[in-house]
Image (tube, rainbow, N blue to C red):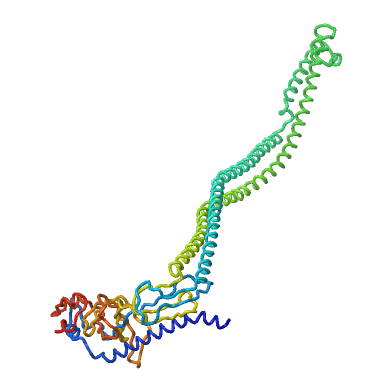
């Protein structure tokens, strides 16, 4: 088991090691060639630099360096989804040194592992599709719930204004009722107080009127008795005036009887009215005491109503404001809930799409059990053999890319800040001419052979037709300059060859 696990990881490690070794060998060869031929300078470039200016530019301040050409290397990785299924190589068709075209068969996998891998990816797609369908339903439910919650919150907020207004109106009525009771009680207390304070024996029930009538009748009676010669005691008193009319006697006697009876009934009425006055005063005093006690209660109730009014109005306002705040927040809460559901749905969709892509990539890559080359060229490294396991990310092979040519140079620490990735450069190659290029890489790690000689590796990729170039050719680079600058340099008229991209030393020398 332990040996099997080592076999799983070793191809990728071996691949990386071989690629690194290959790069080191190429770089070492380039370096050796550079030191052997660094003394060879392009006379045309030297003369151009000596002229000083081209297009108003100070050519003496441009950064220059000498290096060697490097042929591009393309590597092909096995790029499919990471699988639990082991993809076993049954046969390898190519070898190092073979020159291949695009879509040339590289290796064949066993039929069993291809089918197992296809089933694994198909099962993953089925699971992802089911999960996506579940998230579609969950999303729809989440939107419904979010919409219901939003509508309920908005409705509550709309009703909150009516509830708030009714609460304020109720507090207004309660306070007004309490105030009215106090005002009415104050009026009653004032009335009872006035009645008690201004009381006289007769002023309330009219007793004084009957007293005046009694005195007048008594004076008339006394006067008539004296005038007619009757003593006061000889005249009887009847219970009522009707009874007095039934008395026999002469007219004077009857008149005196009627008059005395009237005096009697007037006196009784006076007594009754007087008693009413006394009772009225007593009732007024009792009512005053009762109303004063009630006034105290009404005033206490008013103070409480006033305090409750402030508290209850504030509570109603807070409830109303909270409902409005919830309404303002409702849209944000709705958007958040829908976005959360949408994110989950998008995640499920992405997972489904990824598994679909994984299956499609697998079918496109090794669906028929065979892996093909993605480019053309001479194979300079092959990292797999029959019996190996092919895993995602494995570098299967590397081949020379004759369409890509770079120049590797070293730039002094004092000059490295003057150049940048993407900057144009003019490159002169011995016996081949001049080419335009651009900086594609500046290694951030420095190289040094002493404290004072510190350099940085810079890579310049050439443009134009590089098919005639080979590796390890001496190249001189002027950064920040192009062939257009050279053609406009005084005395530097370019030949037709220069204008086409490649210029020989013979055509550019002065």
- In the depicted structure, whether residue 15 falls above or below residue 118: below
Location of residue 503 (image quadrant): bottom left
Extreme residue in the top direction = 250
Extreme residue in the bottom direction = 450
- In the depicted structure, whether residue 252 falls above or below residue 435: above
Q: Quadrant of the C terminus?
A: bottom left
Residue 326 spot, x, y in % from top left: 54, 53
In this rendering, position of residue 493 left or right of residue 249: left
- In the depicted structure, whether residue 9 falls above or below residue 253: below
Residue 373 spot, x, y in % from top left: 39, 74
* Camera-side residue of 131 and 378: 378
Residue shown at 70% from the left, 34% from the top: 195
Q: Quadrant of the N terminus?
A: bottom right
Location of residue 475 (image quadrant): bottom left
Residue 6 spot, x, y in % from top left: 53, 82
Residue shown at 53% from the left, 61% from the top: 126
Residue 428 spot, x, y in % from top left: 23, 82
* Camera-side residue of 232 and 356: 356
* Camera-side residue of 25 and 146: 25
In this rendering, position of residue 241 left or right of residue 420: right
- What is the total number of numbered labels drawn onto the structure image? 0
In this rendering, position of residue 271 left or right of residue 439: right
């Amino acid at each position: 088991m332990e040996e099997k696990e080592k076999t799983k990881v070793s191809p990728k490690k071996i691949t990386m090691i071989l690629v690194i070794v290959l790069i080191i060998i190429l770089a070492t060869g380039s370096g050796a060639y550079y030191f052997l031929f660094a003394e060879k300078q392009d006379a045309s470039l030297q003369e151009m630099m000596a002229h000083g200016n081209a297009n108003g530019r100070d050519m003496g301040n441009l950064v220059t360096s000498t290096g060697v050409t490097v042929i591009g290397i393309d590597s092909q990785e096995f790029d499919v989804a990471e699988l639990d299924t082991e993809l076993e190589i049954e046969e390898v068709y190519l070898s190092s040194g073979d020159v291949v075209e695009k879509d040339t068969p590289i290796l064949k996998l066993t039929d069993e592992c291809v089918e197992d891998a296809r089933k694994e990816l198909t099962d993953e797609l089925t699971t992802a599709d089911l999960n996506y369908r579940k998230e579609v339903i969950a999303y729809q439910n989440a939107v419904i719930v979010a919409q219901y919650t939003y509508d309920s919150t908005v409705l509550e907020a709309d009703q909150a204004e009516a509830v708030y207004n009714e609460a304020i109106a109720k507090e207004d009525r309660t306070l007004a009722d309490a105030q009215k009771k106090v005002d009415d009680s104050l009026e009653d207390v004032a009335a009872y107080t006035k009645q008690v304070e201004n009381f006289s024996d007769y002023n309330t029930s009219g007793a004084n009127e009957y007293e005046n009538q009694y005195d007048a009748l008594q004076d008339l009676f006394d006067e008539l008795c004296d005038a007619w010669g009757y003593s006061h005691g000889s005249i009887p008193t009847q219970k009522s005036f009707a009874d007095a009319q039934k008395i026999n006697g002469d007219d004077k006697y009857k008149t005196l009887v009627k008059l005395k009876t009237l005096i009697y009934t007037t006196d009784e009425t006076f007594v009754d009215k007087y008693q009413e006055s006394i009772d009225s005063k007593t009732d007024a005093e009792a009512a005053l005491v009762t109303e004063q006690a009630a006034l105290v209660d009404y005033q206490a109730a008013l103070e409480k109503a006033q305090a409750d009014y402030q508290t209850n109005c504030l509570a109603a306002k807070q409830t109303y404001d909270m409902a409005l705040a919830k309404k303002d927040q409702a849209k944000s809460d709705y958007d958040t809930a829908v976005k959360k559901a949408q994110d989950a749905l998008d995640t499920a969709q992405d997972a489904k799409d990824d598994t679909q892509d994984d299956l499609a990539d697998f079918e496109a890559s090794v669906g028929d059990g065979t892996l093909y080359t993605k480019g053309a060229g001479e194979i300079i490294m092959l990292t797999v053999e029959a019996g190996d396991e092919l895993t995602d990310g494995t570098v299967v092979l590397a081949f020379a890319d004759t369409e890509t040519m770079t120049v590797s140079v070293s730039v002094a620490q004092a000059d490295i800040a003057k150049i940048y990735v993407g900057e144009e450069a003019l490159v002169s190659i011995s016996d081949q001419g001049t080419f335009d290029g651009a900086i594609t890489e500046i290694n951030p790690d420095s190289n040094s052979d002493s404290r004072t000689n510190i350099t940085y590796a810079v890579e310049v990729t050439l443009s134009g037709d590089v098919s005639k170039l080979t590796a390890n050719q001496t190249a001189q680079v002027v950064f920040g300059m192009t062939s257009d600058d050279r053609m406009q340099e005084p005395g530097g008229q370019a030949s037709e060859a220069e204008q086409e991209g490649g210029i020989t030393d013979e055509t550019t020398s002065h």
